[in-house]
Amino acid sequence: MKLIFLGPPGAGKGTQAVGVSAHLGVPHISTGDMFRMAIKNQTPTGLEAKRYLDAGQLVPDSVTIAMVRERLGMDDCANGYLLDGFPRTVDQAIALDQISAPDTVIDIFVPDERLQSRLTGRRVCGKCQGTFHISKLDDEHTCPICGGELYQRNDDKPETIATRLQAYHEQTEPLIDYYKGNDKRRVVEENRLKTVDGDCKPEDVFKAILATLE
Ligand code: ADP
Ligand code: ZN
């Protein structure tokens, strides 16, 4: 199964991807996590990507596509993948269709006005990369899963959130039409898009995703 999770920042793609990838037995590949790891380890990709992440802008396609191409070539992707945060531009989608075309694209829909508070309240575990909302944490600083230390991502500050939502609407939202098969540059004809309501409890979103995949 080759699966993509589409949706705005804060839609819950990462949270759902953890459960769904375990359920399907395919690797969860988050380009955001890969970039954050590369930055932490100061790799060439990390050094290049850092200023874009800090500004809430997309990393250039050439860098991102090269990173994903390498990742999809690894053995664990032989039976498929679940991509979270890639593609984010039509050029990335075209490249992916040429590398290893996804079967299904799930668009997790959440209205803009709900995203702001989801993002400003988000905390990430430095150890297991789990994400949590402060409204559901007893202790704002400690991961309820692994006990690791929670932090707020640099780009979850209000100034950067606006830039990220703008990047989503301008560069990523056109992928909805692309995956419906409506873009002139399409590589695959068929409609691969399914939409799931992301504005409800995580366990209900999870059930809706599994129902869509049946
Ligand atoms: P979110 O979905 O919450 O915005 P991510 O962790 O997916 O967070 O992405 C964080 C940042 O990583 C993005 O704002 C962007 O700078 C970079 N990034 C992640 N995926 C891509 C991509 N496919 N293309 C370009 N930049 C990306
Ligand atoms: Zn943790």
Image: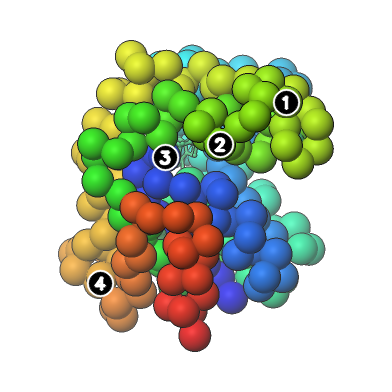
Where is residue 156 drawn, in percent x and y?
Answer: 45, 22
Residue at point 33%, 30% (across, down): 116
Secondary structure, mark 2, is helix
Residue identifier under label 4: 181
Q: CA distance from mark 3 to mark 4?
A: 26 Å
Q: Residues within 10 Å of mark 4 (few under 14, many from 20)?
A: some
Q: Residues within 10 Å of mark 3 (few under 14, many from 20)?
A: many
Q: From this viewpoint, is residue 194 visible? A: yes
Q: Nearer the viewer, mark 1 or mark 2?
A: 2
| Vertical placement of residue 202 versus 33, above or below | below
Work out which residue is located at the far front of the displayed protein and give it. Answer: 138
Q: CA distance from mark 3 to mark 1?
A: 21 Å
Residue identifier under label 1: 142
Left/right of residue 186 with respect to residue 57 in the rendered view: left
Q: Quadrant of the N terminus?
A: bottom right
- Reading the chain from its start, which is encountered first: label 4 or label 1? 1
Residue identifier under label 3: 10
Where is residue 34 drawn, in percent x and y?
Answer: 64, 37
Q: Is mark 3 within 8 Å of ligand 1?
A: yes
Occupied quadrant, residue 201: bottom left
Q: CA distance from mark 4 to mark 2?
A: 39 Å
Q: CA distance from mark 4 to mark 1?
A: 44 Å
Q: Nearer the viewer, mark 3 or mark 2?
A: 2
The answer to whether marks 3 and 4 mark residues whose Cβ atoms lie closer than 8 Å is no
Q: CA distance from mark 3 to mark 2?
A: 16 Å
- Reading the chain from its start, which is encountered first: label 3 or label 2? 3
Label drawn at residue 136: 2
Q: Nearer the viewer, mark 3 or mark 4?
A: 3
